Image (spheres, grey):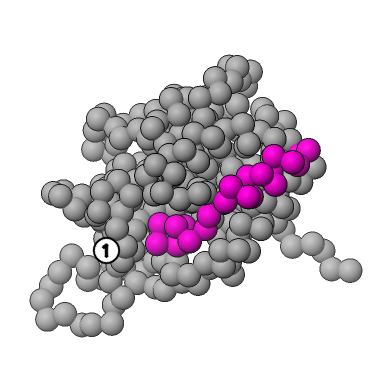
Amino acid sequence: MGEAPARKKIIIDTDPGIDDALAIFVALNSPEIEVVGLTTIYGNVYTTLATRNALHLLEVAERSDIPVAEGSHVTITNGNKLRIADFVHGADGLGNQNFPTPRGSKVDQSAADFLIHLANLYPGEITVVALGPLTNLALAIQLDPEFPRKIGQIVILGGAFSVNGNVNPAAEANIFGDPDAADIVFTSGSDILAVGINVTHQVVLTDEDLNQLAHSKAKFAQYVCKILGVYFSYHHEAYSMQGVYLHDPTALLAAVDPSLLTYTEGVVRVQTSGITRGLTLFDNCKKKYGELNEWLHKPKVKVAVTVAAPAVVRLVMDRLMQE
C-alpha cells in the first residue's frame, strides 16, 4: 500500500451567499482537499456580513478550527459604491433565516496578509478558490510582488466568455464587482483557471434534486434546504427556470478534480471603464498582430470551456448528503 496522496490545501475567498454556503459544505466533505482558511469579500453581501456568515457556516459544520480572515471593504481603487446582490441571496445573504450570531471570531490578519502568509508558509502548495470579486487577491499581489509565483493555483469563479453577463449583457457579477482588481489578477502570471458563467450555467440543481436533499437526514442537506428558497425564487423570476445555477460549487469542484472540466489557454484582459466595464475578453493568441497592443507579452491563463454537468451535480448532492 502506497501512502495516500497529500490533500490539496485550499483557501476559499468567499462572499457567503447561498451558493457559497453550498461550496463551503462540499469542500468540507471533500476528502481530496484540506480547507486551511476562509477569506471574506463583499459581493452577495457587504464584507462585515460575509465574515459573520463565514463564521456561522463553519460553526454549523463544527469546523470553527478553520481561520476566517476579513477582506477588503472597498474595491482596489477605493470605490465604496459596491454592488450587493441581496435580491438574489436575501438581506442576510443566507435566505433571510436570521441565524444567531456566531460564537467564533475572525483572525487579526487581513485577508491579503493571510493569503501572503500562507503562500510563504506553503510555497506552491496553496490553491485559492475565489468565489467573489478579486480585491483581496489583487491586494496580495500589490503587497507582495512574489505572491503570484508562491501561490499554487487560483481558481476564479468569474467572467462570461463568449456569452452575455449576468449583471448586464457585458459583465459577470464577480468581475463587475471590481474590474480593476480582476485585470491585475488575470495578468499577474499566477497559475490561473477561470470558471465563467458560460460553464456554470450548464450546472443546474433542479426542484427534484432539492426534494431529494429535503429527504436526507444529513446535517448539510437539511441546512441548505432551509436557505435555498430565496435562491430558487430568484432564478424562477430572472431566468424562468425550475432550478438554480451551481456557480460556486462548480468552481470549488474544479479545484478538487480538474478533469470535470475542459480548458483552453490564452490571455484574458478585463475592461475597466465604459458600458462594457467588467467584460472579460479572451485572446486565443493564434494571431500575431502588426501593432503593439495591451495584450502583448501578457501571461496565459486557463479558461474552462466545457463541464461534465451531471457529474458535478452528483458530487454536490453526494457531499451534501454525506452523514
The stretch drawn in magenta includes residue 314: no
Task: Kindly identify which residue carries mark 1.
Answer: 281
283 on left or right of 12 = left
Q: Quadrant of residue 257?
A: bottom right
**Residue 220: x and y, percent?**
69, 38
Looking at the image, which is closer to me, 114 or 81?
81
Looking at the image, which is closer to me, 256 or 213?
213
Judge whether residue 75 can be spotted in this image.
yes
> Which residue is drawn at the image coordinates 40% and 62% (left, top)?
198
**Which corner quadrant holds the N terminus?**
bottom right
> Which residue is drawn at the image coordinates 52% and 58% (left, top)?
203
Q: Is residue 9 above or below residue 230?
A: below
The stretch drawn in magenta includes residue 207: yes
Q: Quadrant of residue 177?
A: top left
Q: Which three-letter amino acid code belongs to the residue tagged 1?
A: Leu
**Residue 262: x and y, percent?**
50, 72
Q: Is residue 6 above or below residue 287?
A: above
